[in-house]
Each structure stands twice: as C-alpha cells, then as structure tokens.
Image: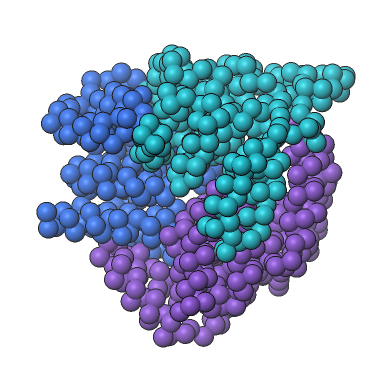
Chain colours: A purple, B blue, C cyan
Amino acid sequence: MKSIAALALAMTFAPFASKAASGVEEDVSSVAPALQRYQQETLDNVLWKRPGLSVRDRSVVTVAAIITRNQAGLMTEQIRRALDNGVKPAELSEIITHLAFYAGWGNAMAAIDAARPIYIERGIGADQLPISVPTLLPLDEAREAQRAAAVEQSTGPASPGLVRDTGEVLFRDLWLRPDLAPRDRSLVTVSALISAGQVAQVPFHLNRAMDNGLSREEASEVISHLAYYAGWPNAFSAAPVAREVFEKRANP
Amino acid sequence: MKSIAALALAMTFAPFASKAASGVEEDVSSVAPALQRYQQETLDNVLWKRPGLSVRDRSVVTVAAIITRNQAGLMTEQIRRALDNGVKPAELSEIITHLAFYAGWGNAMAAIDAARPIYIERGIGADQLPISVPTLLPLDEAREAQRAAAVEQSTGPASPGLVRDTGEVLFRDLWLRPDLAPRDRSLVTVSALISAGQVAQVPFHLNRAMDNGLSREEASEVISHLAYYAGWPNAFSAAPVAREVFEKRANP
Amino acid sequence: MKSIAALALAMTFAPFASKAASGVEEDVSSVAPALQRYQQETLDNVLWKRPGLSVRDRSVVTVAAIITRNQAGLMTEQIRRALDNGVKPAELSEIITHLAFYAGWGNAMAAIDAARPIYIERGIGADQLPISVPTLLPLDEAREAQRAAAVEQSTGPASPGLVRDTGEVLFRDLWLRPDLAPRDRSLVTVSALISAGQVAQVPFHLNRAMDNGLSREEASEVISHLAYYAGWPNAFSAAPVAREVFEKRANP
C-alpha cells in the first residue's frame, strides 16, 4: 500500500486533518465556551484517565458508540485516537465488520469511509489487515447449542431466516474470527447495545462479555463512559439491567 | 423536466455517481476485506436472492430502513437499486412522504436530497410523480372508527393535538393517497418501526400490514432482511413481538 | 468578533445559505410534491401557529429534536429559525451544551458545526455567549438529596461512576448554569428523551419540567409537535407515559 499513490492521497488528507484538529477548540468556544471546558476538564482530564477501564478499552467503547450512532463528526478523531491508544488496525477492521451486523450495514460503511483515509495516511496496508477467510477460533459447541436452542424457541416461529443467519453467519463465523478477541468482541457488542438504547439484549451479551473476561468493574465503567458518548439516557437505561446481571452472577 | 438544464445537472451528478460505485469494493477491502466478502457472499448473493420476499419488496424494506436511520452513505445506492428493482418513481416519492411522518421530517428531507439528483439523472419529471392533491382511496369507516376510538382512549388525555393530527393528517389523508398501495404503505411503516427499535407499535401495524395483504412468510423475511440493514438487535427485538402477532392471528 | 475576518467568513456562508433556502421548495417538489404541500399547509401554516405552545418554545423543542437525532439536513435552517423566533444566542449555546450530556457528545459537536457559521454570519460574539464558569443558580438541596438517593439505590450498585458524574457534573453544575432557565432546560431534556425514544426517563423529567413551570397544555403540545420532527412512533410511545404523569399530578 505504501505506493506513491497512497502517499499522495495521504498528503491530501493529512493537512485537512491536522488543520481540523488544531481548530476544534476555538470552534467549540466560539459557540459554547462551557462545552469546550467540559471537553477538556471533564472528559479529557478526568473521564479518559479514570481507573476501572484502560485507555485502550475506552477507545474500543467510544469507537463502537460513534459507529453505532453513525456520528460522522467524531468518527475521524476517535478512530485516530483508538489507533494512538493501542487498538491495532486489524482489531479496528474487525470492530467495523462486527458492527455491520450489530449496528447495521450502513453504519459500518460510514465507518469505512472515515477509516480509509486514516489507514492510507498511516500507511496501513493489506499486511496489517485481517484476511478475509482466516482459520476460525474453536467453537464451544455446548455453549452454542444452548444459545441456538434458546433463540430457536423465542425467535424461530417468527423468523426462521433470522435464526439460521444468527447461527451460521454470526456465531459460527463472525464471532470466531481470530483478529478480535472474544472479550473485545463482547465489549463492542455491549457498547453497541447500550449506545442504541437496546437494553433487551444486554443481559445475554453482558453475561457473555463477563464469561469472556470482562470484569464487573470494567463493565461498570463502560456504562459511565458511554453516558458521555451515547448520552445520559442510554446509560441510565442500561444501569438497572446491568445491576441485575451483576447480582445474579454474585448470587447464582 | 427533460430540459437542457436538467440534462446539464444530470451530467454533473452522473460521473460522480458511477465513479463512487466502481470504487466501493476496493474501498471496503482496503479497511476490512472480510466485510467486502460478507457484502458479496452473504448479502448480494444470498440475502437478496432468498425466496420469501421479492427483490422489489426487499428494496422497499431497505430504503425504508435507510431513510428511518438517516444513513446518507447508503441512500444513493439503495434508491438507485430500488428503482432498478421495480419500485416506481411515484412509489418512491410516496415512501419518502410517508416516512416524513413515520420516521421524522428531517429523515424525509435527507431522502429528498439523495433522490433529487437521481430523478434528474434518470429524467424522472413531474409526469411520473404523484400529484399533490389526488383523489383519495375510499376510507374503511368502520376500521377507522375503531382505530380512532382506541387512540382517543390511550392518547387523547395526554395529547389532543396528536390524536387530531393522527386522524386528520395520517389516516384520513396520507394513508389514502393512491400512489402507494396500502400493503406497501404498511410494509414501509413496519420496516420503519423495526428499524427504529420502536416495537411497541409493531402489533398494530403488523396486523394492519397482514390485513392489507402482507403474508406471514413475507413478514418473517422482512425481519431477517432488516437484521442486516438495521442491525441484529432491532431484528431480535421485533421477532418475539411478531411471533405473538402471528400466533394470535392463527388462533384468534 | 465583528472583525474583518468574521465579516469575510460571513460573506462566504451567507450566499450559500440564502441560495439553499430559496431552492428548498422546488427541490422537495421535484421529488415529492405532496411533501412540499404538507410542509407548507400542515407544518408552517398550522402546526407552528397552533396555540398551546409559543413559537419560541416550538423552536426550542425542534432544535432539541434535530440535535438529538443528529440531523444535519435541518440543523442550519432550524437554528436560524430558533434565533429568529426569539431564542437568545446564549440560550442556544446552553441548549447545545446541555444536549452534549443528554443526547451525546457527538450530537453537540455536530450542532456546533452547524451553529458556528450562523453565529459568525450574525456577528454573535463572545459578549453574547454564556461564560464558561458563571455563578451558578442556587441548588434546592432537599430536592437534590431526594434525587441522589433514588439514583444511588437504582444505579449505584451498577455504576458508581455514573452516579457520581450525575450528581457532580449534571445536577450540581450543568443544571445550575444561569443562561438557560430551569424550565427551558427541562423542556430541552424532555424533548430529547421523546426524540430518542427513551420513555423510561420521561416520568422523572416531565414531572421536573412541570415543577419548573411547564404547563400541562404545553407538555401536551410538545408531544404533538414532536410527532412531526421526531416521527409519529416516538410521539405515540411518549403519550401514555405523559398521560400517567398528568393523572398522578391531578390526583396525587
């Protein structure tokens, strides 16, 4: 990818990007000085530095929220920040692919549009991307059989096509792709559900996330982080649902 | 409309459009090769060719989802695809107008912005558009009285203005406009509700859709089609609600 | 701000803006003549002139809906309309800041992008903006203690960070900023909740809005106004919740 064409493209995008970045602060202040202060004092200096969730995970959560909510305005800056915070290009690629299914096809396509110039700008080529058909992670057949049976019972009579695709496309393929750890895939999924106000499926996926290694402290902090990026109402709708999951796991 | 000005405008838009179309595949692959593969193998070659829902209806459902979710990125390509798949320009015009009310005014305006250059490009003029004040379809007074009474009871005390507008603007005007069949209007409405995660009103509108001629098999496949374009969580929230509707209709 | 640079910028934006405004009608008609008619007859001539909610408040509600739903297409026109309808620049600035928390950070940033050229164009400078750290309104300690206790009980076990931020950042800071009256802050919050389909928190905030001076008639008309700008389904989901609030307040 590091061809002359790629470099030329990168040069086209880079100046725009850095100009935008340097201008953001005064842009915000010229309309809402308080918002600029909150950005700096409450978000950058406090939220992003809080313990409980690593900076890298905060970027995974934020990017998932921005893509799920299809917010072109923050996408470029947060994708850059994610790469700077240690999210690997291959992981970001898988996050976008994962969200095509969990947020919607158009959301992923908008994320591609935002990521592409950044990948070019940073010289991220095919060698750093996940291959299209990799060797999949091993499937936990027992867990999958349990999941499939539950979905068959609840959803099968309404939409056999949905049940089939959920098994074949999601749990026997997408979730087993190796370039994003199952724990991170769960983190992305839970973040997407909360950001879309889809609490009904939070119990299943939050349990799965914790089975996959997300700690309770991390899950708590995902919710309070998302209050800022998905809005307070979505965080408040998720909290009681998460509380119930935490309590059931503590007293099974 | 086929004036020189229109042709000039069409020439302005057309090259951009075809360039965009030809570049999409490699754009996606340069960030997420797997997503490109899913697009081709799972969506284009399987989903869109599945029986249970015609290609034309899949386009109606997809366009409704994209407009409801306000996804500028897919709008141009899916409006083109809809016209190619047999959705008439007059129908598309009514779909957008219908969604001004069921998805929100801004959503319809964004769809107008996307459709306008395509209509110009294809020489679709006033003669192919629905007239502003047509002869309305006959109203089923009994069904409407039943609907109005239910809404008056549930909503009247909270918002008399909403109740009045629902009757006068929607059910005694919009729903009776002749250039989109009631069955298709229902298909658009159900797709919008599922795409927005608004399941509370799915029972009323899915029943109405089936009364208007949508088959159970088609309704099932609407849900699994929307999993891809509105995200899995919305499809999963809709499925149990649809299941209940199906069961009540089977055993009334 | 009324520097030569500002004027130059204003001149850059103004012609584009007025051209867009003058072209909107024929743009809509060229795709959907009926939608253009509804815009004029149903919205501009009826909805916006209905009693029950002032034109200024309708603008507050509409801007809150547009920002919450992140609809770039209507943002410029509705921000202009709000300023024309008597929403002060300082109030608009606070509305955007408030929605950073209640709709999401990216939504506020997109609103900043839309507002900035309008502020420049109208010569709205720092002297008309709220200062970053003003003297806050007095806190009703009893009401705040009650709120905090309820949230601590429901949300504390799930996310201590969210509980802390809700108190410190929102109710002991944001809500006390003086450049937007508490009644208007509540109006914005209720509009955001309804527009996002987040009815779970409508009871708390609608009660608070009415405690802060919003009349029942105004609240009713907020719902029917939002039917147009946030879509019918969101209005219909909000109505029964509002009805319960109204009834409980009438018969406590």
Estimate the x, y position of residue C250 in percent, counting from the top left. 38, 31
Residue at screen point 76% across, 37% down:
A34
Residue name at image x 53 percent, y 36 percent: C208
Relative image position of residue B121 (x, y in whole percent): 49, 33
- Please state the horizontal and vertical placement of residue A87, each as a whole percent of the image: 71, 67
Front-most of residues C220 and B84: C220
Q: Is residue C45 left or right of residue C182?
A: left
Please provide percent x and percent y for residue A227: 62, 52
Q: Is residue C54 above or below residue C222?
A: above
Q: Quadrant of residue B45?
A: bottom left
State whether residue B90 appears in this view: no
Residue C212 seen by the camera: yes
Q: How many labels, in total?
A: 0
Quadrant in the picture for the C terminus of chain C: top left
- Give the quadrant of the N terminus of chain C: top right
Please state if A89 lies on the left or on the right of B54 as rendered: right
At horizontal 17% and vertical 26% (from top left) the residue drawn is B138
Of residues C7 and B160, which is closer to you in this image? B160
Q: Front-most of C251 and A3?
A: C251
Identity of the residue furthest to the right in this view: C4
Q: Is residue A75 above or below residue C51?
A: below
Q: Residue at x 69, y 61 (%)?
A: A59
Q: Residue furthest front?
A: C142
Q: Is residue C49 above or below residue A240?
A: above
Depicted B24 relative to depicted C243: above or below: below
